[in-house]
Image: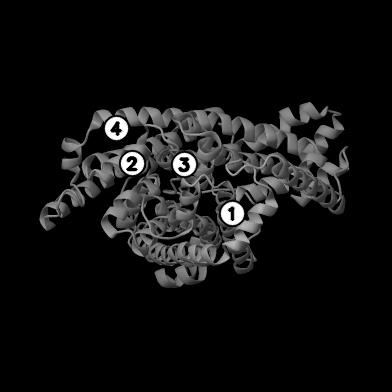
């Protein structure tokens, strides 16, 4: 990794610096487009990413804090960050985080497994593909979260059923992305396998599955925050003791500090899941091209 | 897709041609629907999970005025939120692009806020803005705002080096380079984000109605649940799915029309 001198206002890129920063960028983490070609003006090398993010977050919190104090906003409308820290019921928040995370992880595992298996089936069998692919595209239009009342009527109430919502949310992006990944194989690679007289199993193992992996991780990255959101919303209807339930009970009893604490906790959980998927991708697919 | 399908065709298994596969699919669906209809009629009880499709359509038809006004309510909330959210996102993206140092901070902040489940804010917004139209439109606005902001800003920031260099060579300045080079370059990502944002705004409005509302499709879903009325619940689900599907399809079509030069506009892949 080449060190850059930070903050060179208005410097034109020097030769040899053209493609250099793409590698350092990745230290910045999620969907971080800093350094894909240096902008005119301020340049931020990749290792500063987390530092900058932390500084920005601190600045935003400071603005929030002073804004609330200066305008004298009552805490039931919008509590200042300091009030959230001191007044929130963190014990309840932690309990809720546990419950929601369990449901999300369960749904994540089930939905990904089902989506991946079905994608393999569809890609292996033309007959199945002609039936299931249009069906999958049709079903994808269903807003999964809106199924919560249906699940309640059909199967009853209970925390375990929120897992179903998470699994369904994860299922569709995985199915469709893996399917496209399996199909997005270069013709030359297939021809080579044909020339080498490989069995279909080998073609999948050596060519198709590796090709599908990056889009599988893309799907997981999208699905992780959605699954958290889905479980939280499903908790309002289906029941359970997670973050979604806490948000709404705290809102109804005007405990705004706890409500905001739960909202912030939910974003931390979603962000952590997102980062975990990204980290796993970097460890497992070091060869994949990063966007 | 077609190229690869053709490729696999030359290598071993013949894929089905379009007509055969459409016929097979149609046959299977007809059989499924018929089986569902028969099963539903045989097993029918008011709280049954699978009311026959004919009955669901009947419910939709009999309650058409109520469903129509409820749908209009939710679509109106979603549309107001969507328009506001997209407009705000575009303005903010351009401001962030003009002021790189501040923009960098705001971009990072918006990425963090992006992972906040927007609908979790619904109770707060309903408590603040009341049960009417405004609170639902606000939730829809937030749901539409972030995908557009993050996608558009990301695309504006990651403009191809060659495009940038062309701008420098032609000495276009910020406005010129934006107008002639970088906006066209970012347009596909913007169009793709609309395809995410439109259904998201509708779903967000619908879910926000669960927190508190006096009318709307989300409320129709809840009432059907409280009344153990499976056919009504199915009817509301069919309606809402049709709307989200149509929204995604419509904006996908707009994206294809608006950015004909971009080959990968709609590969069907879901990317953020």
Q: Which of marks 1 and 2 is in front?
A: 1
Q: Does any portion of residue A88 appear in the rendered image?
A: yes
Q: Quadrant of residue A48?
A: top left
Residue at mark 3: A230
Disc 3/disc 4 C-alpha distance (Å) = 18 Å
Q: Are marks 3 and 2 on the same chain?
A: yes
Do callouts 4 and 1 point to residues on the same chain? no
Count up the numbered dots. 4
- State the CA–CA distance, disc 2 to disc 4: 32 Å
Residue hosting label 4: A93
Disc 4/disc 1 C-alpha distance (Å):
37 Å
Label 1 and label 2: CA atoms lie apart by 52 Å
Identify the secondary structure beneath mark 1: helix
Task: For marks 4 and 1, give the one nearer the viewer.
Answer: 1
Number of other residues with Cα within 10 Å of mark 1, as a class: few under 14, some 14 to 19, many 20 or more: many
Q: Quadrant of residue B100?
A: bottom left
Distance from label 3 to label 2 (Cα)?
33 Å
Looking at the image, which residue is at 16% across and 54% down? A67
Chain ID of residue with mark 3: A
Disc number lying in front (3 or 1):
1
Report which residue position mark 1 lands on: B235
Residue B105: image tag = none
Query: Which of disc 4 and disc 3 is earlier in sequence?
Result: 4
Q: Look at the image and tell me whether residue A264 can be seen.
A: no
| Label number found at residue A48 | 2
Dot 4: element: helix
Dot 2 alpha-carbon crowd within 10 angstroms: few under 14, some 14 to 19, many 20 or more: some
Give SS at disc 3: helix
> What is the CA distance from the residue labelled 3 to the residue labelled 1?
21 Å
| Subunit that carries the residue with mark 4 | A
């Amino acid at each position: 990794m080449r060190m850059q001198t930070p903050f060179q206002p208005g410097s034109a890129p020097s030769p040899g610096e053209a493609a250099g920063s793409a590698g350092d960028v990745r230290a910045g983490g999620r969907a971080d487009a800093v350094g894909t070609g240096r902008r005119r003006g301020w340049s931020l090398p990749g290792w500063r990413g987390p530092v900058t993010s932390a500084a920005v977050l601190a600045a935003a919190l400071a603005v929030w804090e002073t804004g609330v104090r200066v305008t004298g906003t009552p805490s039931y409308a919008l509590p200042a960050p300091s009030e959230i820290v001191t007044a929130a019921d963190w014990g309840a928040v932690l309990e809720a985080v546990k419950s929601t995370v369990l449901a999300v992880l369960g749904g994540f595992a089930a939905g990904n497994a089902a989506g991946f298996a079905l994608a393999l089936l569809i890609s292996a069998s033309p007959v199945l593909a002609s039936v299931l692919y249009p069906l999958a595209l049709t079903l994808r239009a269903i807003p999964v979260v809106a199924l919560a009342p249906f699940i309640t009527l059909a199967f009853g109430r209970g925390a375990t059923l929120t897992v179903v919502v998470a699994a369904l949310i994860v299922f569709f992006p995985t199915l469709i992305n893996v399917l496209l990944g399996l199909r997005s194989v270069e013709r030359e690679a297939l021809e080579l396998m044909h020339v080498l007289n490989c069995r279909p199993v080998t073609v999948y193992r050596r060519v198709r599955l590796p090709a599908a992996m990056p889009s599988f991780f893309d799907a997981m990255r999208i699905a992780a925050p959605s699954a958290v959101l889905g479980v939280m919303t499903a908790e309002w209807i289906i029941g359970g003791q997670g973050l979604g339930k806490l948000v709404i009970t705290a809102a109804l009893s005007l405990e705004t500090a706890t409500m905001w604490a739960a909202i912030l906790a939910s974003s931390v959980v979603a962000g952590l899941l997102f980062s975990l998927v990204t980290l796993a991708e970097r460890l497992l697919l070091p060869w994949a091209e990063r966007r | 897709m077609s190229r690869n399908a053709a490729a696999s065709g030359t290598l071993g298994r013949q894929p089905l041609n379009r007509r055969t596969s459409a016929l097979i699919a149609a046959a299977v669906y007809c059989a499924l629907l018929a089986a569902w209809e028969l099963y539903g009629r045989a097993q029918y009880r008011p709280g049954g999970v699978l009311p026959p499709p004919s009955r669901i359509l009947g419910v939709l038809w009999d309650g058409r005025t109520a469903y129509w006004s409820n749908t209009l309510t939710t679509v109106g909330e979603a549309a107001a939120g969507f328009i506001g959210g997209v407009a705000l996102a575009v303005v903010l993206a351009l401001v962030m692009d003009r002021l790189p140092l501040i923009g960098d901070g705001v971009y990072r902040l918006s990425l963090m806020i992006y992972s906040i489940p927007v609908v979790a804010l619904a109770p707060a917004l309903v408590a603040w803005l009341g049960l009417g139209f405004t609170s639902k439109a606000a939730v829809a606005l937030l749901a539409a705002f972030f995908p557009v902001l993050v996608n558009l800003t990301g695309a504006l920031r990651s403009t191809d080096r060659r495009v940038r260099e062309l701008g420098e060579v032609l000495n276009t300045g910020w406005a010129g380079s934006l107008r002639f080079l970088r906006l066209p370059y970012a347009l596909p990502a913007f169009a793709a984000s609309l395809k995410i944002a439109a259904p998201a705004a509708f779903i967000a409005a619908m879910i926000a109605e669960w927190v508190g509302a006096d009318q709307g499709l989300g409320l129709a879903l809840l009432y059907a649940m409280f009344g153990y009325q499976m056919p009504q619940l199915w009817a509301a689900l069919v309606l809402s799915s049709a709307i989200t599907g149509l929204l995604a399809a419509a904006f996908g079509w707009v994206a294809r029309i608006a950015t004909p030069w971009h080959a990968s506009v709609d590969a069907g892949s879901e990317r953020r």
